[in-house]
Image (cartoon, rainbow, N blue to C red):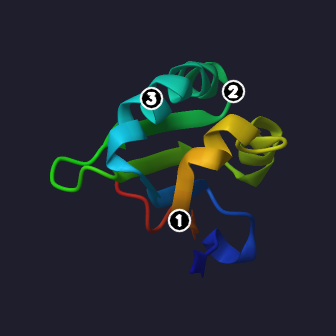
Amino acid sequence: MSWPAAGGPPDMIIVIGHLVVAADVREVYLSTCREVVEQARRTPGCLDFAISADLLDPGRVNIVERWEGREQLEAFRGAGVDDDQAGMISSASVVEYEVGSEHALD
């Protein structure tokens, strides 16, 4: 889904979704994400970044990110998830939305 402002670049990128890991390794997975969250929040252009345990599903990890734009997101993302983390993920459903200023509700 894309809503660019007046044909220009989006004003914000929202990344949202979830990962599925085995319930018995979720806490281990989340502990490996702490440094990633800290780094993301220090990155210029990061408006919000959270990786958290789902309250109802013991194998679900929720992902929420907000970025000023594509350039900042791509600069942070780099190579993506490391091999140790990737090995714990059994499935993922994560999408990106480009939001123009007329749709942002700050």
Q: Is residue 9 above or below residue 12?
A: below
Q: Position of residue 43 (x, y in %)?
A: 67, 25
Task: Determine whether, in the image, residue 30 is placed left or right of residue 71.
Answer: left
CB atoms of marks 1 and 3 within 8 Å: no
Say which amino acid is labelled 1.
Ser
Residue 4 horizontal/vertical position (percent): 64, 72
**Tag 1 residue:** 91
Disc 2 marks which amino acid? Pro
| Screen quadrant of the N terminus | bottom right
The residue where tag 3 is placed is 28
Specify which label sits upstream in the sequence, 1 or 2: 2
Compared with 65, 43 (above or below) is above
Mark 1 to mark 3: distance in Å?
17 Å
Place of residue 79 in the rendered image (x, y in percent of width and height, measured from the top left): 84, 43
- Where is residue 60? Give x, y as percent: 34, 54
Count residues near mark 1 (Cα–Cα under 10 Å), then give few for <14, some for 14-19, many for 20+: few
Mark with earlier residue (1, 3): 3
Can you see residue 14? no
- State the separation of the CA atoms marked 2 and 3: 28 Å
Residue occupying image coordinates x 43% and y 37%: 50
Q: Is residue 99 left or right of residue 105?
A: right
Marks 2 and 3: CB-CB under 8 Å? no
Q: Which label number is shown at residue 44? A: 2
Observer-nearest of 3 and 19:
19
